[in-house]
Amino acid sequence: MTIRTHTQKLLDNPPVPVQAKLAAAWTSLMFFVIYIDYFHLYKPGAIDQIRGGEIYEFDISGFLLTIFVVVIGIPALMILLSMTLSARMNRATNLIVAALYIPVMVFNAASTDWEWASFYALSIGIEVLILAFILRSAWTWTRIPAVPAGPATDSEMTQRSRDTRTNTV
């Protein structure tokens, strides 16, 4: 008599580099902000207000559009910077920019009324959650101990190099 046993195959779950997590989070934020801005156009009177030369309470001008480019350009640059900066600069840049962007995202609620409060609360909540993920990922970035300088360093590095080669063969 044969007994069939179903062994569960586990999915491979390799660690994701912090840089990739940060770039993915900034990409998510970018897509989300763009869609929220698009959905805002469905708000009655929004397109008429834009045609009238205003956004919220601000007159549409070159200066206002420049501010919009900066506000959306910084997260776009953070995608690139998260993948290319050194770990130390990457961590600091992500901590600073994400912390500064939380009030920027919350500012979107300034022009809302109670009828649209749920839309803005949910969208701002998701934006802040993504920024909190960025802050947490950058803050908890794994550190490795520094190798002491001096004559022992060369022999330790040589030994590590030999160990690595022996383990891979």
Image: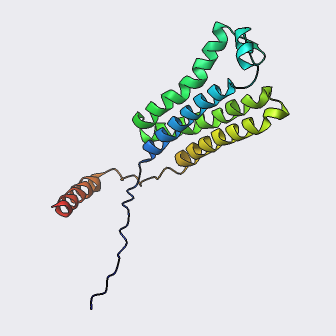
Counting from the top left corner in percent of width and height, residue 37 is at 64, 26
Residue that appears at 61% across and 40% down? 131
In the drawing, does residue 88 fall left or right of residue 9?
right
Count of numbered labels shown in the rendering: 0
Residue 118, quarter of picture:
top right
Q: Nearer the viewer, residue 110 or 134?
A: 110
Residue at screen point 64% across, 38% down: 127
Q: Which residue is found at the position 63% from the left and 7% from the top?
A: 62
- Name the side, left or right, on which 165 lies relative to 122: left
Name of the residue lying farthest toward the left? 169
Q: Residue at x 37, y 56 (%)?
A: 14
* Res. 59 image quadrant: top right
Relative to residue 66, is residue 157 drawn left or right?
Answer: left
Please say if 99 is above or below 67: below
Look at the picture and state if 111 lies above or below 144: above
Question: Residue 75: percent from the left, percent from the top?
Answer: 54, 30
Q: Position of residue 119 (x, y in %)?
A: 73, 36
Q: Quadrant of residue 15?
A: bottom left
